Image (cartoon, rainbow, N blue to C red):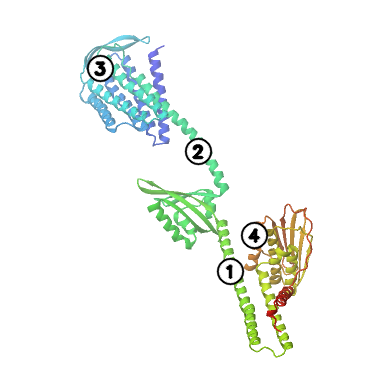
Amino acid sequence: MNWVVAIWSATAGASTLLALVYLVVWNRDRRSWANLCLVFSVLGVLGLLVCELTTMYTESPEVFGLTIRWTHLVYAIGVCGSLGFVHFYFRTGRSWLLGLALALRLLVVAANFTTGVNLHFFVILKLQKITFLGEQVSVLGQWVPNPWVSLGLLASLIQFVYVVDAAIQLWRTGSPEAQRLALLVGGTLALFTIAAPAQAALVATGVLHTPFIVSFPFLGVVMAMAYELSRDIGRTTQLGRELRENERNLGLATEAAKLGIWIRSLPAQEIWANAQWRELFGFKKSERLDVESVAHRVYPADRERIHQAFGEAIKNTGHYEEEYRVMLPNGQIRWIASRGNVEFSRGKPVLIRGVALDVTRRRQAEEATFGLIRRLISAQEDERMRLARELHDDVNQSLALLAIELDIVGQKPPASSSDLRLRIGELSAQVKDLSSSVHQLSHALHPAKLEQLGLVAAVGGLCRELGSAHNIAIEFAADELPRSVPDDIALCLYRIAQEGLRNVIRHSGSTAAKVELRWKESELRLLVTDRGCGFESIAPRDEVSLGLVSMRERVRLVHGQISVESRKGAGTRIKVQVPVHGLHDNPPPQHYDEPTADSYSDRLTQAIERRHEASPSHSTG
């Protein structure tokens, strides 16, 4: 078996396969210039293998010399590939050194093919045979050296300096991965740059009596470069798997959050978007997207503002964030919150990446909140106006009239004591009426009886007052409640009963209603029912809606529950349940009779009479 032919042929086949593999890798990613440089290095090794095999089996000195001339060309291809690999993969090294090394190597090739003689030999007189790996091969016998071989040695020296300089700069970055790369590839290539020319020079000067063998040391360099690139391919494969996994997770996240992702190409004025974004804007999956079609979906009143926001992001800020409305093909209006960042290339904006989210519910909630605030302020002002009118038209005028009558009595007192007592009695009745009016106003502002007499008496009195004032039969039923109900809970239930009965009076058209207060399992329950007209929706009017919202908020503050059941023509039922912990062991309270407004006036009159009896100087006799 011819070992020389077998080894060189097998190595050539492996080199060819390696070159094809990395050529395919580069073709899939044309920006991976290090892969293309490796292909040129492998081609250099392949050419060296062919030239070396030719020189070992030729019998002609002329063919030997011509082959050595072509060896310089394939060697230059391999060297240029290795230097390019260092430049693109290390991303270090001085550019002027790289340019000088490439220029000298090309000068060597040019000298080989333009001077008419081989750079190593002027002439080869004869060859001789030696035994190499058990085979008879040809080597130099007699020849005349060419002194211009020193030009090749100079080119190799500059090549060595460039590689060492690039490897040192890479090492100084401090990264363990970079230092390993500098040591493996940089060290191997630097060693080959010295060893290959040295071996060729020793053979050319007759010191070594062997064939020219440069391919295998160069193959070591190629294998080191291929090893590094294969690690990159492995990392790329792993990153690809992780990226696909992340894309799946991102897809699930965007689908769950209904988050639309979009990319707008500024030069082409085209838009790419995921399925969630298309759904938000009402586009079909196959429908083409461009700036004009998307702008047409934006609500007309918002288009100019969005156009200005995009222009500002592209020219100045680089960031875009807006909320606007879109009109879907079915006529529905949807609020979209969109934000994105502008990406630049060489100082020019090229695209915008962004996300979009449906915020319709939030905007509707904000609008509802603003509407509620407006109605609350309006209701507050209406209540103040009502109190002002009552104070001005009723209490103030009555006081003015009473003052005039008192002045008349003071200026012209009745002649007889019986007439005086009669007149005082009339004035006393007016004072009682004023007291009753003030009491009603005070009671409307804050139910003092709630603190003085308790929840049952306060709600019962409320039912009697409203029923009497509006000619409605209001039935009140109550269990024996704990002695001390927390103030916030008592006020909450009282106000809900008050608001519920007001709604009965204003809106239901019913002539009867029922209020119940029950105590069961550490829970206070209030039930207000009527047999009026009822309603279909929760808010047939703003005023009623505001009242219902107020009741719900009061119950929420005391951690209770409220339900409002109503059906048109079948009345309304308001049910409130509030937990009251720690009061179930308290004894039941005493029962109180509800005092009327007249009783307050009577007590005031009695207090004045007692004061006059105690101070004779104030008597009128």
Helix, strand or loop under label 2:
helix
Q: CA distance from mark 1 to mark 4?
A: 18 Å
Residue 341 shows in the view: yes
Residue at numbered disc 4: 553
Determine the secondary structure under disc 3: helix
Residue designated by label 1? 378
Give the mark toward the camera: 3 or 1. Answer: 1
User: In the rendered structure, which amino acid carries the disc numbered 2?
Assistant: Leu
**Which three-letter amino acid code belongs to the residue tagged 1?**
Ser
Residues at marks 4 and 3, CA–CA distance in whole angstroms: 107 Å
Up/down of 156 relative to 440, above or below: above
Q: Which mark is residue 243?
A: 2
The label on residue 62 is: 3
Do residues under tags 1 and 4 come within 8 Å of each other at their CB atoms?
A: no
In the structure shown, which secondary structural element does the residue marked by tag 1 occupy? helix
Q: CA distance from mark 2 to mark 1?
A: 57 Å
Count of number-bearing discs:
4
Query: Which amino acid is tagged 4?
Result: Glu
Label 4, residues with CA under 10 Å away: few <14, some 14-19, many ≥20? some
Up the image or down, 583 lies above or below 219; here it is below
The disc, 3 or 2, on the residue closer to the chain's N-terminal end is 3
Please name whichever residue, 547 or 387, is drawn nearer the observer in this view of the structure.
387
Crowd tier of the residue under label 2, counting other residues whose Cα lies within 10 Å: few below 14, some 14–19, many 20 or above: some
Dividing the image into 4 quarters, which one contains the C terminus? bottom right
Depth-wise, is mark 3 or mark 2 nearer the camera?
2
Per the model, the C-alpha gap separating discs 3 and 1 is 112 Å
Q: Secondary structure at mark 4?
A: helix
**Of callouts 1 and 4, the N-terminal one:** 1
**Disc 3 residue type (three-letter):** Glu
Mark 2 or 4: in front is 4
Label 2 vs label 1, nearer the camera: 1
